[in-house]
Amino acid sequence: MTENDSIRIIPLAERPSLVSRLYEINDSWPVFTHHEPVAGALLSQVPEEFPQYCVAATDGDRVVARGFSVPFNSELDGREEMPDQGWDRVLVWAFRDRQFGNAPTAASALEISVDVDYLGRGLSYRMLAALRQAAGRQGHDALLAPVRPTAKHVEPRVPMTEYLRRRRDDGLPADPWVRVHVKAGGTVEKVAPASMTVSGSLAQWRQWTGLPFDRDGAVEVPGALTPVHCDTAHDHAVYVEPNVWIRHAIEARTA
């Protein structure tokens, strides 16, 4: 439960009027992530196209959290349930399958964002549970999630596989967001080594980060899970973000 019992989590299919307000929340995503091309092209369309897979949390008239998931077909040639290109790949597949009428065989979470004023109240657990329930209502027996570990940016040069081996004294993952998923019953399956990619000119990266980007090689950027590769001769820098595939088994049921 949250500290504020007035918080309600609502499937967007039941409250479509909330779709236009989902980005009112003050989230903590790094600025450069807003320039990820797949996200820029498709993410904002998810609530309208897949409302039965999305949820919102409200506190009175205020939207305080959003949660997005999408269905996709993992059984077509060349596909798999948990692709190495993680977040980007399942989002593209979801829209392609919708366009061509491919029946979904899997569901993947994309995002849970909580307003910074509401962090630390257990709302992320409730949002995750709501996304699992939403997928269950659509007949899925699992919700997959390409998870972005929230503390990984503190150690960007540590490989994700090594980072995931770190545990607290109680045996739970050291990373707070991975720990939320595991405590909720999720199982860590594999790393998605190229889940998101952000590329841009050096001028763009300077604008996004305030850093000089004047030397070749790895640049540590606040909020980035791995270093950004800078190439001054070719005037570009590229960030490739790894995520962690986590599977949540759910009891499938129809509405």
Image (cartoon, grey):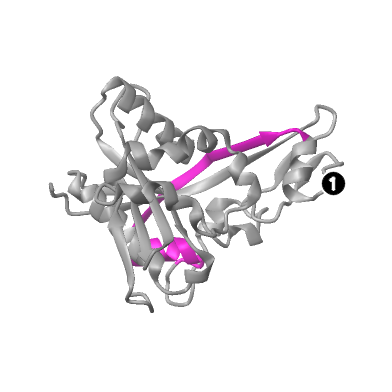
Which of the 4 image quadrants contains residue 78?
top left
Q: Nearer the viewer, residue 158 or 54?
A: 54
Q: Nearer the viewer, residue 121 or 132?
A: 121
Q: Mark 1, residues whose alpha carbon is within 10 Å: few (<14), some, or many (≥20)? A: few
Q: Position of residue 176 (x, y in %)?
A: 49, 66
Q: Position of residue 145 (x, y in %)?
A: 39, 49
Q: Position of residue 29 (x, y in %)?
A: 57, 54
Which of the 4 image quadrants contains residue 130?
bottom left
* Residue for point 13% across, 48% down: 255
Residue 111 visible (yes or no): no
Establish if 194 lies above or below 126: above
* Residue for point 36% across, 61% down: 57
Which of the 4 image quadrants contains residue 128?
bottom left
Establish if 216 lies above or below 144: above
Q: Circle 1 sits on which residue?
A: 212
Q: What's the magenta region?
A: 173-201
Q: Is residue 179 magenta?
A: yes
Q: Is residue 201 left or right of residue 92?
A: right
Q: Is residue 127 magenta?
A: no
* Residue for point 52% across, 57% down: 149
Q: Quadrant of the N terminus?
A: bottom left
